[in-house]
Image (cartoon, helix red, strand yellow):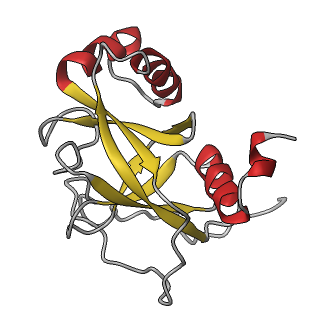
Amino acid sequence: MTDTDALPEADALREEGAKKSGLLWLTVGTAPARPVWHVWLDGASWLVTARADGAVEQFVPGLAEAAEALVDLRSKDKGGRLPGWTARVTVVAPNDPAWEPAVLALHAARLNAPDGEEQPARWKRECDLIRLTPTGPARDLPRDAGRTVPVGSPAVTRGASPFNLSIGRLRRRGG
């Protein structure tokens, strides 16, 4: 019997969804839900957050000070919404025994690290390591489709694409 067999069905779905998807939607207080990357390790979601906006890493205002947050997952296979949960928020200090395994897992999962192997040292100086531990059973899915207005971002399209004469041209075949 595996650990998953001992879990209720909704908890097993939560764990499987969190393991497969590197993205979750996090709601802190009354702020709108925002996407964050994470890894699932030892029954919790782990993530790194910058201490200030405008840093290299993702920034989630108020997360380090919050006691709990709402977590929602998406299905990696179909993109649908999976049952979410309420999580206890814990800031894990560098001297905690859980720090190193979590940082190693996050470092391995981090795409396009700007400083390569120096990244964990930068996290130690500039970021908070957050553990989101599920508290209680999974929440029911909302009756709406879960649609919301995305959080604003400085990553925007520059404007219209330049005029291109080759779009729509037919190729001549043969000769």
Left or right placement of residue 95 versus residue 30 in this view = right
76 relative to 81, above or below = above
Q: Looking at the figure, which quarter contains the N terminus?
A: top right
**One can see residue 171 in this view:** no
Q: Position of residue 162 (x, y in %)?
A: 33, 61
Number of numbered tags placed on the structure image: 0
Q: Position of residue 127 (x, y in %)?
A: 23, 28
Left or right placement of residue 164 versus residue 2 in this view = left
Q: Position of residue 121 (x, y in %)?
A: 29, 11
Q: Position of residue 141 (x, y in %)?
A: 54, 78
Q: Looking at the figure, which quarter contains the C terminus?
A: bottom right
Q: Residue at the spot x=31%, y=69% of the render?
A: 150
- Residue at the extreme right of the image, as rendered: 1
Residue 76 image-quadrant placement? bottom right
111 relative to 85, above or below = above
86 relative to 6, above or below = below
- Residue at the extreme bottom of the image, as rendered: 143
Q: Residue at the spot x=50%, y=42% of the render?
A: 44
**One can see residue 88 in this view:** yes
Query: Toward the viewer: 89 or 127?
Result: 89
Q: Residue at the spot x=68%, y=51% of the render?
A: 16
Q: Residue at the spot x=25%, y=65% of the render?
A: 151
Query: Toward the viewer: 16 or 166?
Result: 16
Query: Toward the viewer: 113 or 108?
Result: 108
Residue 126 image-quadrant placement? top left
